[in-house]
Amino acid sequence: MALPKLVKYKTIDEYHKHFIREYCNPSKNITTFDGITVVFFPNQFKHAFYESSGKGKRNKGKFSTIRARRIDWIKYALKNPNASLYVGYDKKKKIYGKRRRVCLKNNNYVVVIQFKDHRKADFITHFPPDTQYTLASIKKSPAWK
């Protein structure tokens, strides 16, 4: 399974339309390699394709071309049986929980999903780990079984 090419558009609107067309269309449901149907919603675009404008800030006010150009990597990572899977971390409760699953592909790309039930999940976000600390934090999480 070859890594998809980076997508290069001139405007944010073009990336948004691509996201809606490729991911939010129910006729194009994404199913993971292990049979989980992942549902995408148009309002997730801002969370998934924007980042905070400064270290430590929680407001996602800056469009991320790094994330946007990897838009087709979401599908690739979810469908790839060679990705590393980890139990997600709940920041509010400060515990690992089986409700979220983190998919790490090639140590350089992350997709997070949240389970609605044992065969259906919602897409939460995607990103390339921006620091070694982020990557190490993911890798120290319990393996998904």
Image (cartoon, rainbow, N blue to C red):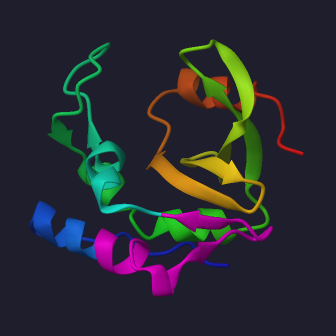
30 over 108 or under it: above or below: below
* Residue located at (61% from left, 78% from top): 2
Identify the image quadrant of residue 97. top right
User: How many numbered markers are drawn?
Assistant: 0
* Residue located at (56% from left, 21% from top): 133
Q: Position of residue 29 (x, y in %)?
A: 54, 78
34 over 87 or under it: above or below: below
Q: In front: 134, or 93?
A: 93
Identify the image quadrant of residue 45. bottom left
> Quick check: is 49 in the magenta stretch?
no
Q: Position of residue 3 (x, y in %)?
A: 56, 72
Q: Is residue 9 visible?
A: no
Question: On the rendered image, what quadrant is the C terminus found in?
Answer: top right
69 over 95 or under it: above or below: below
Give the extent of the magenta segment.
19-39
Question: On the rendered image, what quadrant is the N terminus found in?
Answer: bottom right
